[in-house]
Amino acid sequence: MKIVFTPEWFLGTDVMIELFSFIILFLFFIFSYKSYKITKNKKSLYLGWGFLLIAIAEIATILTKVVLYYDMSFTRHIGEMILTYNVVKSVDFFYELGFFLHKFFTLLGLYFIYRLPMKEKSSSDALLIVFFLLISSLVSTTIYYLFHVTSLILLSLIFIEYYGVYKKNKSKNTKMFLIAIGLLAFSSILFIMSSLAAVYVSGQFIQLIAYIVLLVLIIGILNSSKELKKH
Amino acid sequence: MERKRSRADIISDMLLMIQQKGGKIKPTHLMYKANLSHKQMKLYLDELEKSKLIIKSSVEEANGKKSKENSKEKNVIEITKKGRDLLIKYNQMREFEKTFGL
């Protein structure tokens, strides 16, 4: 079974895209936390948790890929040991754990963001959903596209929930968030067909554009006090 | 129905009123503009002053065309740089919350 779908010429670039995504997600976490500190609105804190979980997911995949792509000593060491069954098993376990954490934290973070605008929240339902997300992440180690299908469902639900928010506030920043979510959903569709190298790379670029849109959104929020700064 | 203003909302409203008046405002104007009772305003002003977000000062106000001797001392509330910075941050956070419908 293939561990990653990245074509050889794209190795490293995917890590850079993921690093950029991590920075944006972490910025959103800082923003949410600061907002909570100032306004004491707990919802801001929960939103921050959502972004932080996805940021942790990005770090998990970055670290796993860095070891996989660049840690030659690790690979050479394994080669020299004449690849006993146990060594191969432990290496597989490392990669599987890294990618499993990426999948589980991504899905959990998306679920946090999805649940936030909902008025009625049942904790028993949430527990059940988290269990299914865990199962989905575990099964995805063998059926890779299950993770992308689950992401696509969650992203579509987030889009619908926040479209409701947009209909109420008509804010251009919410619209920007919807565009980013739409692009991420589209990248998930492409990732379902990751076995085709060109489609996988396109998915990565769409994801990059989505995170650039989120960066523009942060800049937009920061500039929202322009008038006050002039005084 | 409008939601009840939080403590942070009231503080930011007060700072905004001062800022919109060019950085200085008379206490009575602030009280009406921020829609507060005298007691509430006193409490908030003490808190804002303690946190160095505003300073209370007095300015000489000329009484019509009369000489300097007739000028009166008036109390004014002035926003500080720290107060202005907090107002900007608060506005950004409010925009952030609006974006996500929080």
Image (spheres, coloured by chain):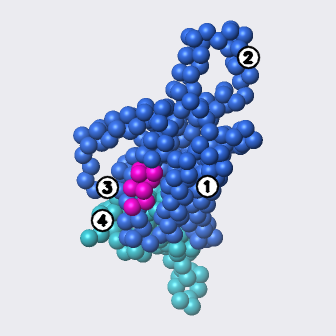
Which one is closest to the eye, mark 2 or mark 4?
2
Specify whether residue B1 is in view: yes
Q: In this view, does A213 lie to the left or right of A175?
A: right
- Magenta residue check for A155: yes
Label 2 sits on a secondary structure element that is helix
Q: In this view, does B49 lie to the left or right of A197?
A: left
Report the span colored magenta.
A152-160
Instruction: From this view, report whether residue B33 is shown above or below residue B6.
Output: below
Check disc 3 and report the residue beneath it: A118
Instruction: From this view, report whether residue A82 is shown above or below residue A115.
Output: above
Q: Distance between the residues labelled 1 and 4?
A: 40 Å
Find out whether the residues at labels 2 and 1 contact each other: C-beta distance under 8 Å.
no
Chain B's colour? cyan
Q: Looking at the picture, how far across and down is residue A66, in whole percent?
A: 67, 31
Label 4 sits on a secondary structure element that is loop
Check disc 1 and report the residue beneath it: A206
Label 1 sits on a secondary structure element that is helix
